[in-house]
Amino acid sequence: MGIEQFESEKTVCWTILVSNEAKLLPEYLKRLLAQDYEKNLIYLYILMNNNPEETNKIIEDFILAFGSAYSGFTICKEPDDAMDPSEADSGAPSTSSNRVAKRIQASVDFAKESDFDYYLVSDVNNLLTSKVLTELIKLDLPVVAPLLTTGADDLSAYTNFHEKNSSSGELLSSARHSSIVSRELTGVIQVDLVKGTYLVKNEVLRFIDYCFSDANDYYQNFALSLFQKTPTTRHFLDARKYWGALIVNDSLEGGRELMSKLEGEVISFSKSESEKEALIAQNAYFKKMVVSSSSFVERHLRFRSDNLHIDFEFIFDHGHEVAHTRNNYVSLRESTSELKAGSIDRALAHIRLLEEAIEKNETVLILEDDVKLHKDFDRILAGLLTRQSEFDTLLLGFNWDSMIFVREHEGSAGIVKQSCNQRGLLESWDEIERSIFSPVTKRLLIGWGLCATLTTPQGAERVLHHLRNFQPEFFDFESSPVKFEFKSFDSIMNAVYKDLRSFVVTPPIAWVQNDRASSTIWNS
């Protein structure tokens, strides 16, 4: 396969924290100019402390020579009376972290009000390789930082991340932290805190408040404000390679040598193109469509951060986008008058994807926006399909602890009730993903939840045929004493599973994040 060209029109507010570092500043600016991202998409927001004239002159000369190449710039100087003279002589960036925090917060507010797609903040002692911005934007994560190195072999050396934080934002030692520093653990890794240089998506900016607490460090405020205001927003570290150098103790010459080496370092991908090609050859690589609402920003961020290992595309259930589909399913809408507007739009978004599967003659994998997929999802699914190649629908996950009805084997008379303790699965997440995981498929009769459903073109035709002629208000399941009312698309699908070649994977390879199984089950 050829190398995919990356083109982006995403705008970035690049904030530079400039302290009294006249020696490092020219090298930092040189690395900024070398970025391979389009300069006309970058706005420079330069935070100056009460710097000496030498530092000011370097910035002014840079802007005079190269400022017009960027989309714009702001130079924000600290007022002369903001710092005690003794602090200016000491070279300290500010009298307290609170003053620095307020000025960084002003740059965040500017980026938010100006509606930039991304906000990047960077210390001058962080020298960055030329592809760092492009590669971070490709990841499309809420908060992500490039892994930087001092070049030292000492595992206790300063790092630009905390793998584990205390409740007050302090670094806690952990074996995983050491594994990242030693490069035993690579990839895109979730951590408690990133600092120094990091990229933030626009949607997250409204949750950031560097000034909201009395933490000793403004980076702690950054982490704590996100954790307390939106626990679903995670920090990520791009540890696929070293993306730059942390210059400590003015070791500029060593830093230049290190940067020359890092520019040539190859990115380590978690999934090779050969693996992807192998899945395609097995007809086991599917386009993954995520049904959601455009207003569910936090759920979108959580989905992205939980499912880095898959390719997917969001489809939003806007009413105008499903209008043509809505008109074809009048009987469905009338028979499910109890459905809330959001539920019917969600149902119609599913239906629209099934229509596209028929039109394109492609199997489609439809995901809900609150699902988390097993880290080896593609590989496990490929293995399942070698054993279960004939099906209409294949349910890959189901609702929290809800009962499902299955037949152990196709053609068997016995009906088996099964449940899955998904809360227990999520609490043991790391252990489960390290273990040998061997799910099987069983004939599905009743199953709650459509968090992850694989449907063939033939299956889509059969499903839509049933839905176009949908009539009943209630249904009983054989000897089950429970009546299920059609108040969700899950229950609608349960009316047709028995007439399809429908199967379910147990244990599931997709886990539902919310805890509302009862929301789709109604007792008579």
Image: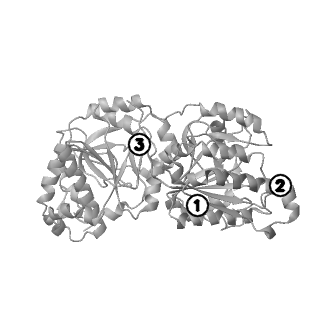
Q: Say which residue label 3 marks.
A: 310
From the viewer's perspective, tell me whether residue 96 is left or right of residue 344.
right
Does residue 159 show up? no
282 or 37: nearer the eye? 37
Gap in angstroms between the C-alphas marked 2 and 3: 47 Å
Within-10-Å neighbours for mark 2: few <14, some 14–19, many 20+: some
Gap in angstroms between the C-alphas marked 1 and 3: 25 Å
Q: Position of residue 260 (x, y in %)?
A: 66, 32
Are discs 2 and 3 less than 8 Å apart at CB?
Answer: no
Name the residue located 30 percent from the left edge and 55 percent from the top edge: 448
Q: Say which residue label 1 marks.
A: 226
Q: Is 89 rendered above or below residue 163?
A: below
Tag shown at residue 91: 2
* Amino acid type of the residue tagged 1 in the rendering: Leu
Q: Position of residue 403 (x, y in %)?
A: 32, 53
From the viewer's perspective, tell me whether residue 201 is left or right of residue 63.
left
